[in-house]
Amino acid sequence: MKEKIYTIPLTEAFEKDCECAFCEIERKLDKEILDYVLGPSYMEEDIREETNKHGFCKYHYDKMFHAQNRLGVALMVSTHLKKIKNDIESVLADEQAVGKRKLFQKSAQTSPIAKYTEVLSEDCYACGRAKKRMDGYIDTFFYLWKREPDFRSKVKESKGFCLNHFSRLISEGREKLNDSSFNDLLSTLIPIERENLARISDELDWFIQKFDYRFQNEPWKNSKDSLERAILKISSARLE
Ligand SMILES: [Zn+2]
Ligand SMILES: [Zn+2]
């Protein structure tokens, strides 16, 4: 059962002192996927076929370029580029066929090349892989929430979630849980989130106060990395 594969990493993420267990999982996943893409996998034909088909997003090209395997990246980009060179011909032909006047008719409001590049820049083999795994972790969260009192206790003891994962849990919980389980989720998560937004806000205020010379000899308390943690809390951005 797929939940079994995800249970241990998910439980471990909830045991970690962090602002969001799911962001913690994403941080690990991102590294694993990058290692995988740049490891021996890119020589396997089925993986090459996939990376060739999807390419990568800006974020992952940047990460890949700055990792250690320039040859691997060059090979993947080279085959993907050849595919683009081929595909773009029919797009350009459409562009010329639509012509300037017709583009402003309702049936063809978007230029064919704009449509093509929009899909191209958003499609990403690494993001696709990460999304599948994250979906598995979210499903496992609800699986454990329904069955494991120990897991519920870990959630209760956590520091809540970033706003994106908080809202995802609530909106998916509404669909996946029965009424009583969903009410239980809301009455657990909302106070935790409220309390932890207040906590991070206080920590950040103390961080700001420390710039005032009158407070320079005061202890930092928990505020030294509060700016990074506050940004993650509101946006899921991992500043590393
Ligand atoms: Zn998060
Ligand atoms: Zn990506």
Image (cartoon, rainbow, N blue to C red):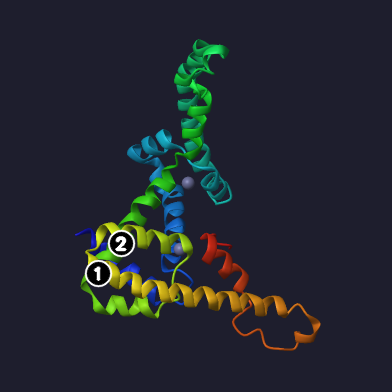
- Residue ID at (58%, 62%): 239
- The location of residue 124, given as percent across then percent down, is 45, 42
Which one is in front, 38 or 89? Answer: 89
Q: Amino acid at mark 2?
A: Gly
Ligand 1's quadrant is: bottom left
Residue extending furthest toward the left: 1
The vertical placement of 226 against 26, above or below, is below
Q: Amino acid at mark 1?
A: Ser
Q: Earlier in the sequence, mark 2 or mark 1?
A: 2
* Relative horizontal placement of residue 179, taking residue 33 as reference (left or right): left
Q: Secondary structure at mark 2?
A: helix
Q: Which residue is mark 2?
A: 173
The answer to whether residue 144 is seen in the rendering is: no
Q: Which residue is mark 1?
A: 181
- The location of residue 91, given as percent across then percent down, is 48, 19
- The location of residue 8, given as percent across then percent down, is 30, 70
Q: Secondary structure at mark 1?
A: helix
Q: Whole-Å distance between the Cαs marked 2 and 1?
A: 9 Å
Screen quadrant of the N terminus = bottom left
Q: Which mark is residue 199?
A: none
Q: Is the residue marked by circle 2 packed among few (<14), some (14-19), or many (20+) residues within 10 Å?
A: many
Screen quadrant of the C terminus = bottom right
Q: Are marks 2 and 1 in contact (CB under 8 Å)?
A: yes
- The location of residue 21, given as percent across then percent down, is 42, 69
- Residue ID at (75%, 88%): 217
- Residue ID at (30%, 65%): 141
The answer to whether residue 92 is seen in the rendering is: yes
